[in-house]
Image (cartoon, rainbow, N blue to C red):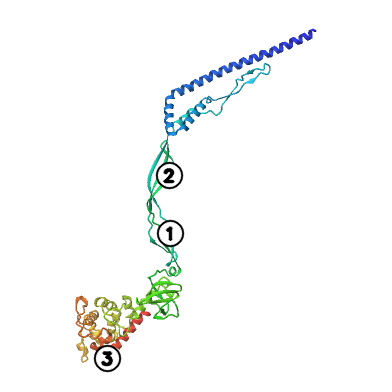
Amino acid sequence: MNKNVIENNEKSRDLKQAFRELEQARYQQLNTKKSIKKVQKIKNRNKINSTLNANKMVYTRTLLESINNKGISVIIIGLLAISLVMISTGYIFATTDVDKDTNQNKPVVEFEQNADELDVLNIISNNISVTMKKELVVGEREVDFEIIKEDNPDLPKGEEVIIKEGIKGKEEVTYIRTYENNNLISEVETGIEPLEPIVDQVVQVGTSEFLANHKVHLEDTMYVTENVELKEKNDKTSQTVCIIDQSLDVKLLELSGEWCKVSYNDTNIGYVKASSLASEYTIPDIVEKCRVKRILKTVDKDMKLNKPSGLNLSDFKKILTDTKDKKNIFIDNAEVFFKLEEKYNINGVFVAAIGIHESNWGTSTIATDKNNLFGYGSYDRGPYENSLTFETYEEGIDIVAKNLVKNYLNESGTQIYDNNIATGKFYNGATVSGVNKRYASDENWNTKVFKIMENLYGKLQN
């Protein structure tokens, strides 16, 4: 072997040895780091053990209480928590490796810092301190009734009427309530027992467009818009009960298709076409027309005069306004004639008609000189001299009205104004012709007076 070869072998030997020395130095360094890590690990473990020992009694007592309240689930949580302690030091360990040259296992003591450390003590504390409780509760509660709606063709469309009031029921309810740390987390019904029955509310809903359009109900007043025949049945060929004049009122009783059953004057009952009826809503002025028509239907030569005419103050002012009343005597005393009706139960139009006839609308000498519109107290011979004089026209009107009530219009013994009793000494019936027999010598007096009454009443239609 030449020198060069020897040198090369020596160099080779020296290089191999150098690698071994380097490997041993590396191994020693790793052992040194491992020892340091082990020491640190032992310190951490001692710290945990110290903390656990310090809380051992508290943990054990709480765990036992939790077992009573939560059962086996808490034990499992505790065991899991203890397991977590063992890996909570913040490190993850690696496995061993194999030395390729020596074919021996050598530990690779490398450690990697755990970025997400577990707060085991907090987890344990939060779980072992939770208390669970269940509670059985029995209580009462109201139960709402249902609303049952029924169609009613005798009500205006859309209108609702309660025909049976609803009554809420009561029931006994059993609950199981679950609490966590005294906070309610769930409530489950386990039983219901009825205590008081439910009464459903019944509501009728109108379907009649006719009633809705006229804004009326059954039993309300309606008016005929033309002269109509009141039929016995809802058939145009049926027998006619009577004729109802235009604008007069009837009471609505029933709906029958295109017919309506009505009552007229409370005595005549029958059917008229629905198209011939109106209400105050559909024809507002028909009420006034009806009132006037009702008054005019009472005007008759045999009409009773010992009762009011039915006119209001506006009516009296209207009928006594006339160009013939040149001195405005009658229009100025319209209220006097109106009040006679209430005071003495007499027809004021009749009294005014007598004054108009006797004084020629207040133009006679007796009326002008003596404020006497009636020639009261006069006789055929010397009428002016014998007629009474009054302070005012009102005084004369009042005296004549009382005289008619007491002596001409009521039978003897009839109680009249101010608790007086009628003498009836000139009574021949409470009509114009009855008064005529003893009040005036002119046999046609009643015809003339009644003609004036008709004219006055007729002004109501203007």
Is the residue under label 2 in contact with that under label 3 (CB below 8 Å)? no
Q: Give the foreground label among 1 and 2.
A: 2
Q: Give the foreground label among 1 and 3.
A: 1
Is the residue under label 2 in contact with that under label 1 (CB below 8 Å)? no
Residue 197, placed above or below residue 295: above
| Snapshot quadrant of residue 256 | bottom left
| Snapshot quadrant of residue 189 | top left
Say what amino acid the circle numbered 2 marks: Thr
Question: Which residue does the image show at 34% across and 84% down from the upper left?
Answer: 455
Q: Give the foreground label among 3 and 2.
A: 2
Q: Is residue 430 left or right of residue 74?
A: left
Toward the viewer: 400 or 45? 45
Q: Secondary structure at mark 3?
A: loop
Say what amino acid the circle numbered 1 marks: Ile
Percent coordinates x, y for residue 37 in the rendering: 56, 19
Q: Which residue is mark 1?
A: 148
Q: Which residue is mark 2?
A: 190
Q: Which residue is mark 3?
A: 443
Estimate the spatial distance between the alpha carbons at disc 3 and disc 2, rounded to whole Å. 102 Å
Estimate the spatial distance between the alpha carbons at disc 1 and disc 2, rounded to whole Å. 30 Å
Q: Which comes before the other along the chain, label 3 or label 2?
A: 2
Q: Which mark identifies residue 182?
A: none
Determine the residue located farthest toward the right in the rendered image.
2
Q: Residues within 10 Å of mark 1 (few under 14, many from 20)?
A: few
Q: Residues within 10 Å of mark 2 (few under 14, many from 20)?
A: few
Q: Is residue 295 visible?
A: yes
Tell me the quadrant of the picture where the N terminus can be found.
top right
